Amino acid sequence: MAQNVLDSLKWFAPETSLVAVLVLIFLADAALPKARSTVLSFMLGCLGLVAAIAATVKLAPLDPTLYFSGVVAHDGLSSFFRILVFASGILGLYAAYGSKEIEEKYRNEYAILILCVVFGMSLMAISTNLIMLYIGIETVSIVSFALAGLNRESLRSNEAALKYMIYGALSSGLMIYGFSLLYGVTGSLQYSQIHTALVAMNMAEPPLILQMAMLLIFGGLAFKISAFPMHFWTPDVYEGAPTPVVTFFSVGPKAAGMAALIRIFYTVFASKTGETFTVMPGTALVHGLAIVSALTMLVGNFSAIAQVSVKRMLAYSSIAHVGYLLMGMVATNEKGLVAILFYLVVYYAMNVGAFIVTGLVMESRGSDDIESFRGVGWTNPYLGVVMAVFLFSLTGIPVFGGFVGKFLLFGSLIDVPGFLWLALWGVLNSVVSLYYYARIVKAMWLDKPVSASSQPLPAIAMTTYHWVGLALLAIPTVLLGLFFSPVVRLAKASVAALLS
């Protein structure tokens, strides 16, 4: 454990670089004209995030280390999620720089808010203490409310921010109360000490107060990842918030929430036994997660079928994908953990790509309805092809990364007694998702680019900036379906600390 302050600061270098960049952006905003400071803010933000990724990589080898008196950890898992959330910040800035939805006067604020959220997400990923976790979650939540309502003149954006804030305040209150109950039972806020205290109690059936604490904590984390039954905010916020903000929301906070959920689940409420984990007896925690996973898939996929707005459809789709991710938690083995990490990487590329294309269509044709996608494949073949790649991967069709991710998730349950039904349920839900994804592909390639009144729809405006960005997302979406071994090996190395 790194107790010396200077040693601890070394391990905290990625987050320190973000703070330094935030200070520079504030200074640039105050000293330079608005137009110049805006460009500089985005450039500094991207450079700061790249520096944070470089600092994370430089801290390897990934020997597990606790620092700042043990409240945060440096290990393979924290490094993996650090890189993932820093990368999500880069794409959040990328999506906004070429977008007309973020008004010019709010662009500096957008860059600052994105970096603040990324800082909070990183804290969530590295926390090994309940208070530090709560600080990270509140940093993400409060700043996210402002991001959702960034366009203050838009009623839809204001509505999205208000709903997000109401649900967020409720979930935070429930979770902090769960933390207090857990502290009351175990006398500690440290994950490892809580686990030791629970094991020492040797309870055949945990008392009601402990079960209530677990329910409240997992309920709060369910809000961050949009899992049932805390998913209600997602479609309204995704529809009302600016598309670049939604693009960022769809991957970053979910990755951070999964990081927190994995660390709490496997280091507090489970013990390693051989190649698998044994959850605290008498809690039915695994079966509860299985039910939540099944219901999350069901609600997400069947709600998406009825949607006309593509942003709302992708919102419900993102809920369904959380259900798939939770299958890896139910497996309680190395295969499940590796599958979660691999799927998050693939989901990052294909989901962000789908939202960027949706934003381009919305800007050019004034709507995100499926009808607005009519004939996109014929007026802009490149856009039609990359969108089809993203949607087919989200469905889980072979040769795309989404197929390998789902195959790993479903396969992790095959050898787990009593949960074959959940794997089959996941397969059936993937078939259901093909229907609503195919509606978009049909509109792009089988319908003419004309409106209901037979008026030609405008071509989608694209620049080299968009061509390059979409290619950098579409290529790995395909390659991860063919050459997935390197990412799988990285995922195994990242979870090694939990398995040791």
Image (tube, helix red, strand yellow):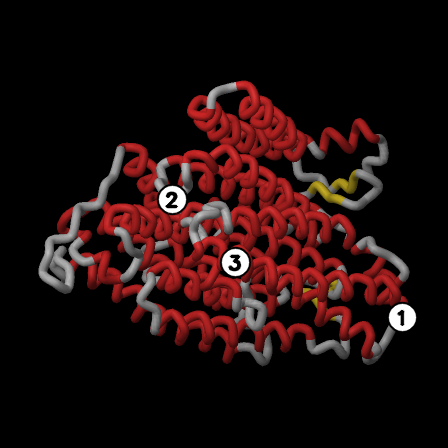
Q: Is residue 163 left or right of residue 385?
A: right
Contact (Cβ within 8 Å) of mark 1 with mark 2 = no
Q: Mark 3 or mark 1: which comes first in sequence? A: 1
Label 2: how many Cα within 10 Å (few below 14, some 14–19, many 20+)? some
Can I make out residue 26 in this image? yes
Per the rendering, the mark at residue 201 is 1
Type of amino acid under label 3: Ala
Q: CA distance from mark 3 to mark 1?
A: 33 Å
Q: Is residue 197 left or right of residue 148?
A: right
Type of amino acid under label 2: Glu
The answer to whether residue 146 is above or below residue 266 is: above
Q: Mark 1 or mark 2: which comes first in sequence? A: 2
Q: Mark 2 or mark 3: which comes first in sequence? A: 2
Type of amino acid under label 1: Met
Q: Nearer the viewer, mark 2 or mark 3?
A: 2
Label 3: how many Cα within 10 Å (few below 14, some 14–19, many 20+)? many
